[in-house]
Image (cartoon, rainbow, N blue to C red):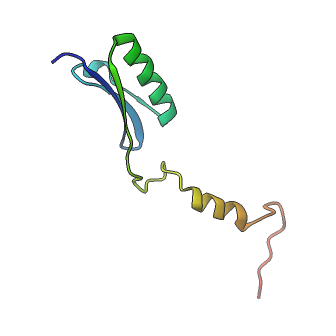
């Protein structure tokens, strides 16, 4: 099978670039931005199409939840304040 597409997608908590027909060119990355950039560059070098497959959140810790992060940031306005228990 000949090379035709570089696909950037999430797989098991990492982002990977999969090259159809050339698995030896496939690589994994820590985050989406790195994978997309490398996928675009590889596609240009090889004269291939680059496709990004979005994925649904898995619920794994690697998927940030903006709502819970905002809640955590507003929960304690002064993290350096001494701890006090309310009776």
Residue drawn at x 65%, y 60% is 70
Residue placed most toward the observer, 17 or 41: 41
- Compared to 16, does 22 lie above or below? above
Image-based side of 36 in relation to 66, left or right: left
Residue drawn at x 84%, y 68% is 82
| Residue 32 rendering spot, x and y as whole percentages | 47, 36
| Residue 40 rendering spot, x and y as whole percentages | 43, 22
Numbered circles on residues, count? 0
Quarter of the picture containing the C terminus is bottom right
Residue drawn at x 48%, y 50% is 63
| Residue 7 rendering spot, x and y as whole percentages | 33, 29
Query: From this viewpoint, which residue is outermost toward the right?
Result: 81
- Compared to 71, does 15 lie above or below? above
Query: From this viewpoint, which residue is outermost toward the bottom?
Result: 87
Image-based side of 9 in relation to 83, left or right: left
Quarter of the picture containing the N terminus is top left
Residue placed most toward the observer, 82 or 38: 38
Residue drawn at x 80%, y 76% is 84
| Residue 21 rendering spot, x and y as whole percentages | 21, 21
Q: Quadrant of residue 2?
A: top left
Q: Quadrant of residue 23?
A: top left
Residue placed most toward the observer, 59 or 51: 51
- Compared to 65, does 4 lie above or below? above
């Amino acid at each position: 099978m000949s090379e035709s597409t570089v696909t950037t997608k999430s797989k098991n908590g990492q982002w990977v670039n999969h090259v159809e027909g050339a698995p030896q060119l496939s690589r994994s990355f820590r985050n989406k931005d790195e994978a997309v950039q490398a996928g675009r560059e590889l596609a240009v070098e090889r004269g291939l199409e680059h496709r990004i497959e979005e994925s649904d959140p898995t619920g794994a810790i690697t998927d940030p939840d903006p709502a819970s992060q905002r809640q955590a940031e507003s929960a304690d306005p002064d993290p350096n304040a001494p701890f006090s228990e309310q009776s």
